[in-house]
Amino acid sequence: MSRKEAYQEKIRARLDKWQAEIEKFKAQTRESKADAKIEFYQQLDELTHSQKTAQRKLQELRRASSESWAELEAGVDNAVAALHQSLDRAQQKMRITRQKSTVPR
């Protein structure tokens, strides 16, 4: 397996894992209270945008020649990092909101 193929496989595995987490976040959003849903749907929009960007960058890398793919690697890394950060922010916001809603007043 070439370095390019190994890199693509590693990135694809990350994206697949995060896809499952995004689906879980969507389900939690649908179950949220109305006032929180608006914010969570905004988080989902950010996640979707970041996810599409990462997937597009990976596609560009797949189409790149063996000689030029290394030039695209940084762009893929940046897009994947942005998706991971978006997912972390969304999950953190969900945890905080759920904790607030379960605290007795």
Image (cartoon, rainbow, N blue to C red):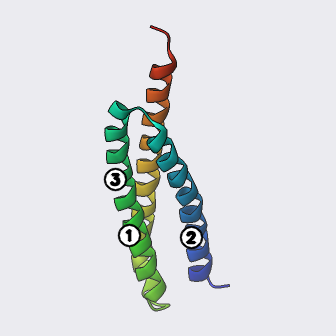
Instruction: Name the one closer to the observer, 4 or 20.
Output: 20
For the question of whether residue 74 can be seen, the reply is: no
> Which residue is disc 1 drawn over?
75
For the point 33% across and 39% down, the residue is 39
**Quadrant position of residue 51:** bottom left
How many neighbours does mark 3 have within 10 angstroms: few (below 14), some (14-19), or many (20 or more)? Answer: some
Spot the residue most to the right. Answer: 1
Secondary structure beneath disc 3? helix
Residue 50, compared with residue 37, is above or below; it is below
Residue 78, compared with residue 32, is above or below; it is below
Q: Position of residue 15 (x, y in %)?
A: 53, 64
For the point 52% across and 54% down, the residue is 23
Instruction: Name the one closer to the observer, 1 or 14.
Output: 14
State the mark number for residue 12.
Answer: 2
Going from the N terminus, do you reach mark 2 or mark 1 first?
2
Residue 105, compared with residue 69, is above or below; it is above
Tag 2 near tag 1, CB within 8 Å:
no
Tag 1 near tag 3, CB within 8 Å:
no
Q: Position of residue 50 (x, y in %)?
A: 37, 60
CA gap, disc 1 to disc 3? 18 Å
State the mark number for residue 46.
Answer: 3
Instruction: Indicate the amino acid at tag 3.
Output: Glu
Q: Position of residue 47 (x, y in %)?
A: 39, 54
Instruction: Indicate the amino acid at tag 2.
Output: Arg
How many neighbours does mark 2 have within 10 angstroms: few (below 14), some (14-19), or many (20 or more)? Answer: some
For the point 50% across and 90% down, the residue is 66
For the point 40% across and 63% down, the residue is 79
Instruction: Indicate the amino acid at tag 1.
Output: Gly
